[in-house]
Image (tube, helix red, strand yellow):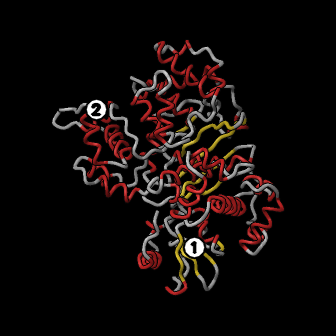
Amino acid sequence: MDLPPFDVCYRALASRDARFDGRLFVAITSTGIYCRPICPARTAKRENCRFFASAAAAQSAGFRPCLRCRPEISPDAAAWRGTSNTVSRALSLIAEGGLDGEAGVSALADRLGVGERQLRRLFDKHLGAPPVAVAQTRRILFAKQLIQDTALSMSAIAEASGFGSVRRFNDAFAKLYRCSPSALRRRRKDATAVTVKIGYRPPYDWDRIVAFLAARAVDGVEIAEPDRYARTIEIGGTFGSVSVVPGRGTLLATIRFPDVRALLGIVARLRRVFDLDADVAAIGEHLSGDDVLAPLIAKRPGLRAPGGWDGFEMAVRAILGQQVSVVAARKLAGKLVGLTSPHLSSDATGDERLVAAFPTPQRLAATDISALGMPGARLKSLAALADAVTRDPHLLDPVGGHEAAVARLLALPGFGPWTAQYWALRALRDGDAFPAADVALLRAIETNGHRPTPAMLLERAEMWRPWRAYAAQHLWAHDAER
């Protein structure tokens, strides 16, 4: 995430190079406005341009966001794991409200296992702004998006974007945009759902991503169709749904959830599920050095590594998938949902096919799951996982780093290397996670009928680091097509 030299930045701006969208922002000293490098406005003179690594850095320097190119829907390149791993984990926590309410930078640093001063230095180095400024920018840009794209009231928008009061929201907005929030409001009909645009840098292989999710979609909880993915969600005992369809350079997410304070976190989770922050160009360039991967990447240059909605859910799915096919694991997940979920009405989800929610740790711990028809050892693993996360809700959080989170998972009964690595790939969004013992990966890499051992595959995968997770995704896609 280090900012490229000025000449490179200016050439990217002059050519409106989409590869730099989200990686840098240009501030125009003659207007006091900052833009995305793809802004359709006339290119400013060199002497009037300043470049920043993040929107927060540009705003901290006194510039206000462009109303034309809309920095609030730019790809969130800062969250990509190509930057400092600590900063990436901090941004993930901030995106889900880690600095909202009473939480401060000290508490955020504790969750990351670093000192507060060290965290501030890392943010200054990689983003050019302190954590609080990043959080504030995130709030106000999200608020601006809700103003223009939804029918929510101003008080609901203030609450949804993490401001403590409408007055604080109005003051912050007027200071940045030099106008009242209502001045940017478009006339819209009232709606029961909120639809927001979530940006990414193309290319994006929607077809393969939705096919991956469709193969694992749990009846009643998820719907995965060629042009739409939807699922039920549960946050704090409240139920709702999200529906995602592809757009032009964005995904369009329709969120039905009664508590507007959850909207920012829901959008952050969607970015994780659809892996919208990956720099697939850089990843593909590196992995193309392998003779087997090169044609796969050329065929699907926009392939991403789908994430998981929730760490606990992904841990349960990983246990259900041990030593069985994807189809069998999906059926087991459906049985588990049938045993644990309340019936949801279409009024809450917006779709009569979305009638169930994935179990929470508490519901799973309180349910007799012997009817699943699984081996006793795996039933005990599910029970132990539910009990452990019920006692410690932060057990699966990336506190102290990915390695520490994986170690906590491995300490639970029934979690071996394959399960832990698959979980880290999808739940932690660890771009270097690699379940080397996966049968589909071994099958996809075989040559002339000779299938490698997990140890052999792991040795070969050394050259794919730090993006082994993306190599795995390409191999899984190749195996599925065959």
Which of label 2 and label 1 is nearer to you?
Answer: 2
- Classify the position of the C terminus by image quarter: top left
Residue 342 sits in quarter: top right
Give the structural element (helix, strand or loop) at label 1: strand
Percent coordinates x, y for residue 312 in the rendering: 57, 32
Task: Please tell me whether residue 232 is drawn above or below residue 58 in the rendered image.
Answer: above
- Residue beneath disc 1: 35
Percent coordinates x, y for residue 265 in the rendering: 64, 48
Labelled pair 2, 1 in contact (Cβ < 8 Å):
no
Percent coordinates x, y for residue 240 in the rendering: 68, 39
- Residue at 35% over, 52% down: 300
Task: Please tell me whether residue 311 is drawn above or below residue 118 in the rendered image.
Answer: above
Pick the residue in front: 472 or 410: 410
Question: From the viewer's perspective, is 308 left or right of 367?
Answer: left
Pick the residue in front: 172 or 36: 172
Q: Indicate the amino acid at tag 2.
A: Pro
- Residue beneath disc 2: 454
Give the structural element (helix, strand or loop) at label 2: helix
- Residue at 42% over, 78% down: 11
Q: Mark 1, residues whose alpha carbon is within 10 Å: few (<14), some, or many (≥20)?
A: many
- Residue at 71% over, 51% down: 100
